[in-house]
Image: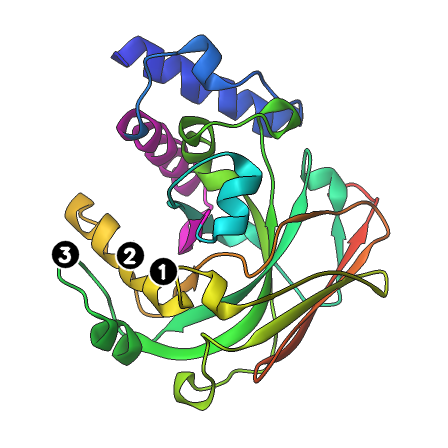
Amino acid sequence: MDASELKEAVARLERAHETREPIDPLVDAFPGATAEDAYRIQQELVRRWADAGDPVRGHKVGLASAAMQRQMGVDQPDYGHLTGSMFHLEHQPIPTTRFLQPRIEPEVAFVLGAPLRGPGVTVADAVRAVDFVLPSLEIVDSRIKDWRIALVDTIADNASSGGVVLGSRPTALGDVDLRLAGCTLHVNGELVATGAGGAVLGSPINALVWLANTVGPLGVTLEPGHVVLPGSMTRAHPVRPGDTVVATMAGLGSVTAVFSGEDA
């Protein structure tokens, strides 16, 4: 993509965020766009948000499980940024009007106590950098009509990020085997999905390693205090006004998100 095409793609996504109106897939308008182009679009969007007072507070790995890759029709993970405005309090109503077409995913959340920067980050480095883990619910959202996304679309759209709800009980990484930790997802009391940590690249810690080694060569360090979401343990489930969503993870406890229909 040349500079003018890049600028136009950023403008389209910005309008979708502002108007809450989804747009046609970017790959339709820019068929030659590559994943590298898409990350340039994402980085420009995030830079503009930070300049407007919404700084980066973490990162997410998307499409880390085989289930999510099948659901979205892609064959590799991607990553996005978590900004301050994306964090919502557990049990407090979240206006669904903040989103276009939200879905929800249960994830382990890593909270870092030391910096991580690749390349060359190992599992040992990643384990040492984690301060504690929390159960979390990620709200994924797409500014692309009907979730008709190719990899370029979701990357450019900040890895389809929408929001995150963190649980309030921290657990030391050494106190739980994340590979074997089972998860249930209930919406309005109905079981809608089950999964386990092993669905996320074999272990959520592998996703943290992948992220550090992927963004490091771009000059990005995963900072102390930042939250890293490694990927969903189940398929994503749509949410609507009035829904109450509870994810329960073995060894980590539960986290609850409540959605209202009120304006943001």
Q: Position of residue 146 (x, y in %)?
A: 66, 26
Over which residues does the magenta segment extend? Answer: 36-63
Place of residue 188 in the rendered image (x, y in percent of width and height, measured from the top left):
85, 60
Image position of 60 with respect to 225: above or below: above
Please give the name of the residue rendered at 57% of the width and 16% of the height, measured from the top-left corner. 24
Label 3 and label 2: CA atoms lie apart by 9 Å
Give the Cα separation between the discs numbered 3 and 1. Answer: 14 Å
**CA distance for labels 2 and 1:** 5 Å
Question: Does residue 16 show up magenta in the picture?
Answer: no
Count residues near mark 3 (Cα–Cα under 10 Å), then give few for <14, some for 14-19, many for 20+: some
Q: Which residue has dot 3 on it?
A: 119
Residue type beneath disc 3 = Pro
- Which picture quadrant has residue 203? bottom left
In the image, residue 37 lies at what x, y percent? 29, 25
CB under 8 Å between discs 3 and 2 = no
In the image, which disc is placed on residue 112?
Answer: none
Instruction: Name the residue tied to disc 2.
Output: 210
Please say whether residue 60 is one of the residues in the magenta stretch.
yes
Residue drawn at (74%, 38%), measured in percent from left and top? Answer: 97
- Could you tell me if the residues under marks 2 and 1 are in contact, i.e. CB atoms within 8 Å? yes
Identify the image quadrant of the C terminus: top right
Q: Tell me the residue at 47%/53% (across/down).
A: 65
Camera-nearest label, 3 or 1: 1
